[in-house]
Amino acid sequence: MKEIDLKSAIQQVGTRQDWAYVESMSEIQARAMTALWVRGATYPEIAEEWDCTTAAARLAVERTLADSLDDSEDRTKQRMRLVMQYDALLKELLPRALKKGREQQGFARLVLQIDMQKSKLLGLDAATEVNVNIASAQEIQEWANQVLALKGMAMPEEGDPFVLEENPETGTFE
């Protein structure tokens, strides 16, 4: 049986100051620490980045993870939990997908599938709404009148192609 001395146990569990620090920290900071952990950082590395103890880093990450798991009805928390899992998978698989070799194709395909699932989860694959505004005939007519007025001209009057009049000299309809 492995013995753990009191000092190393306190370093792992944390002191009252560590607990107080984690309780007073903002949710954003705790999430940022957790994001580092998800990307593969160790607790000592997180502690060094945030200038805190290793125990405080561990407590902050565990608090964030616990908060993300506490509600099975909250879809936002479910999405965030899955995003963290996808990120962890991608962290492991992406280097293999980018490394040349016989297995590269299989890992690349797997990474693409995970990326597609993640984009669906986050709604990035949703259709984009496009509004096409087409001017009405009246708006086009007004615009043309304004352009011609700027040039000192008037709109020419067009004849109706469906109204035909007989020319008495030629006997034809024009």
Image: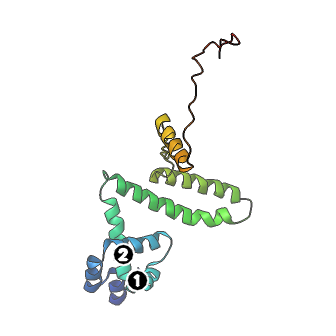
How far across and down, in percent of the image, does residue 157 sit?
56, 31
Which part of the image, by quadrant, shows the N terminus? Answer: bottom left
Amino acid, disc 1: Trp
Which residue is denoted by mark 1 in the rendering? Answer: 50
Residue 11 is left or right of residue 143, and the answer is left
Q: Where is residue 161 shown, x and y percent of the image? A: 60, 21
**Left or right: 73, with 109 as reference point:** left
Q: Which residue is mark 2?
A: 29
Q: Residues within 10 Å of mark 2 (few under 14, many from 20)?
A: some
Residue 110 in which image quadrant? bottom right
Label 1 crowd (10 A; few <14 / some 14-19 / many >=20)? some
* Image location (x, y in percent) of residue 94: 61, 64
Q: Are marks 2 and 1 in contact (CB under 8 Å)?
A: yes
Measure the alpha-carbon separation of dots 2 and 1.
9 Å
> In the rendered view, would you say 4 is above or below 133?
below
Query: Tag 1, which secondary structure?
Result: helix
Please report the residue visible at 63 percent of the width from the left and 12 percent of the height from the top: 166
